Amino acid sequence: MSWIDVRSDTVTHPTPAMRAVMQAAEVGDDVYGDDPTTAELERASAERLGKEAALFVPSGTFGNQLALFTHCQQGDEVIAGEDSHIVWHEVGAAAVIAGVNLRPIPAPKGVLSPEAIKARIRPSGDIHLPRTALICVENAYSSGHVVSLDDMRAVWETAQDAGLPVHLDGARVFNAAAHLQVPAREIAQYADSAMFCLSKGLAAPIGSMLVGSRDFIEIARKKRKLMGGGLRQVGVLAAPGLLALNEMSARLVDDHLNAQTLARLVAEIPGVVVDQQALDINMVFLRFNRAVDGNALVEAMAEQGVKANPPDQGLMRLVTHWQVGAEQVQKVAAALRSALEQQQ
């Protein structure tokens, strides 16, 4: 069966062009700094995000946690959105790797308010209190929302006033840039460091990039080795990463348009309520206005060749990517309609 997979944009297969450049990639030992393809990916990534240097890492979680590990000391506190990826989906790694405490704050639609941040910054001079060391923002947010440049700037200015660095979890920063119609560097200018994924909508088989100042990346490179991320002939992975960065990032608007089409189609299904306020990027969030067996629903969709995740606390997410085009979204909507009809 030829599957249509809308569980996430992490399920993307490398494009035929990516497979070709993997085979032909020029490689060397990257721990020695000898891999020319990786060096080019790092140079290009830093340039695209407007930073001095970059570092290839195996995954987005690795990149975020390496950033915390580099910015912070053990016992420090990190302010982050209460439903952000760093708080919600990284296995509590901040406590294990960097040895820091996360101080979550509300982040409606991904926005951290300056007032909420100021209220959580620890005053200095009290030996009972941890040191606030870092503020983490996320854009695009995992809820499907894109944070505006004005809101990014407000957090940055708050951090500057407090003498704190900002880290951007930009796993889907190019999706955010496509929605805002700006270069990604305009988002990253409001952060000292940033991570973005090559392996989500950009379709590379593995890898993320951590960017920042040269001094920051120099420290992070050593700590990456400590974390087991010193890779050898990694040019075979950097080569598709370059295609992801330079070519696949330019087509993300297609995924966004396909998600909007999918949202319109599934909203026409009786019993389905689409969150019309969370359609900034390539995600569609929906609920049902009647009782639905989520596991039976995705099983019925799978019988029609569509892979989807069941609703989580009543909320279901469908994600478009380069392998889910106009024809596929029609089939996804039809499969969802049919699966719901089986439960009537």
Image (cartoon, grey):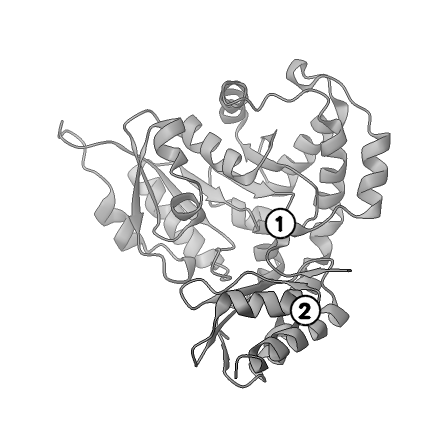
Disc 1 marks a residue whose amino acid type is Thr
The residue lying toward the viewer, choosing from 227 and 144, is 227
Disc 2 versus disc 1: distance between alpha carbons?
A: 17 Å
| The quarter of the displayed image where residue 329 is located | bottom right
The residue lying toward the viewer, choosing from 25 and 245, is 25
SS label for mark 1: helix
Q: Which residue is pictured at 60% across the width and 33% down the height?
A: 58
Q: Residues within 10 Å of mark 1 (few under 14, many from 20)?
A: many
Question: Can you tell which mark lies on residue 258?
Answer: 2
Percent position (x, y) of residue 73? Answer: 33, 25
Q: Is residue 106 left or right of residue 197?
A: left
Residue 244 seen from this side = yes
Question: Can you tell which mark lies on residue 10?
Answer: 1
| The quarter of the displayed image where residue 228 is located | top right
Percent position (x, y) of residue 183? Answer: 62, 52
Disc 2 marks a residue whose amino acid type is Asn
Q: Which residue is pictured at 64% across the width and 16% down the height?
A: 31
Q: Which residue is pictured at 72% across the width and 33% down the height?
A: 237
